[in-house]
Image (tube, coloured by chain):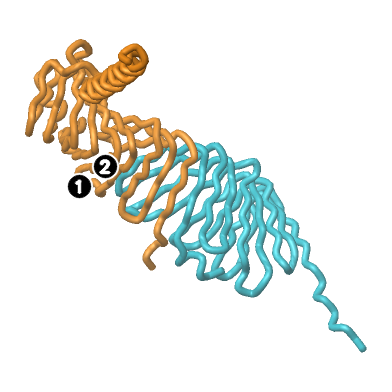
Chain colours: A orange, B cyan
Amino acid sequence: MTDRRHPWLIAVLSLAVIITGWWAWSLHQRELPPPLVGPPRSDYQIEQFELLVFDEQGKESFSMRGPRLARHPSLGTLDIEDPRMRAPDGEGKVWTGRAERAWVSRDGDRLRLLEKVELRGPTTAERVPIRLRSEQLDFLPKADQIESDDWVTITAPGSILRGKGLKAELASRRIELLSEVTARYEPIAR
Amino acid sequence: LKSDREKEMSLDAGHGDIVLSDNGRALLSEGVKIEQGSLRIESRDAEIISQAGEIKQAILTGSPATVRQDLDTGGQMQARANRIDYDLASNVLLLTGSVVITQPEGELRGERVRYEIDTGQMEGGAPGSRIQMTIKPKQKAPTN
């Protein structure tokens, strides 16, 4: 009697082993943490920071504040969220900027504002207020210049200029739009 | 059209070198198109001069620079020249160098022509150069 039941018993038991084995393996897979993607861990992070950058002569290059700053451990660059920037131009007049993100080069000579960038020029008696909007704008404090490879829209009283690619000197407000330039001027008041 | 000057002016160019200040200047190049109402100007380069935040003058140089505009009296004015100075305050075009202006009534050629956009009045001539005018005969009323 036992001979006939013996092979069936083995079959059932081995099926049970396979099922429980597969079940245990799948549970284990689910617990594994997702593989780490993206830059390596920053060597330090600062919350609610204010950053002041000075040039070699001790003159203020720019200042920035925001909710979070992280320094890249090997490159020495900074990645910043939701930055608010202030920068004096060659005549000491302050430009203000904001964006979704920012990146600062290792020696602070290039500050890249990224996504929903807005830069406002100083408003003074002799300077009309201007505003630049783009998805990428580089600020070069030493050269007192800004650059972009992207579309830039420049709004000033009575005019809207737009082009692809930009080079500009802050103090003199000389702006070069490199291609596909359009301009709209309001009619002269009579 | 007289109403053109109350319209927004739009410009289009391949490259722009602009000084953004109250009394600014913009050098546009690589093919310039200017539109203001029915006024259409095309040239190779353009210098736009503004004062107190408003455009006062547009200097267009080309090969040639061309102008087209609808006339309040019907029809269209077309002009070409090596250089066109558009004074927006007085609404006057100063055309210099191989100037040809064509209107429904006829054609005027010369080296220097002053054209008042509001009235269509033209004044031509420059030292040492003459102007040529061609006036089309009035269409005879059909006799039945």
On the rendered structure, is B15 left or right of A161? right
- Residue B32, given in percent of the width and then of the height, sits at 54, 44
- Residue B112, given in percent of the width and then of the height, sits at 63, 52
- Residue B68, given in percent of the width and then of the height, sits at 63, 58
Q: Amino acid at mark 2?
A: Glu
Q: How many marks?
A: 2
Instruction: Determine the residue positioned at 19% across, 22% down.
Output: A78
Where is B16 relative to B138, above or below? above
Q: Residue A123 has which mark?
A: 1
Disc with the residue nearer the chain's start (1 vs 2) = 2
Q: Quadrant of the N terminus of chain B?
A: bottom right
On the rendered structure, is A141 left or right of B81? left
Q: Quadrant of the C terminus of chain B?
A: bottom right
Q: Residues within 10 Å of mark 2 (few under 14, many from 20)?
A: many
Between A190 and A186, the residue placed more toward the observer is: A186
Visible residue check, residue A57: yes
Instruction: Determine the residue positioned at 84% across, 83% down.
Output: B141
Residue under mark 2: which chain is it in? A
Between B8 and A107, the residue placed more toward the observer is: A107
Question: Based on the displayed image, in which of its 4 quarters is residue B18 positioned?
Answer: top left
Question: Based on the displayed image, in which of its 4 quarters is residue A57 positioned?
Answer: top left
- Residue A86, given in percent of the width and then of the height, sits at 15, 35
Q: Residue A118 has which mark?
A: 2
Residue under mark 1: which chain is it in? A
On the rendered structure, is A187 left or right of A142? right
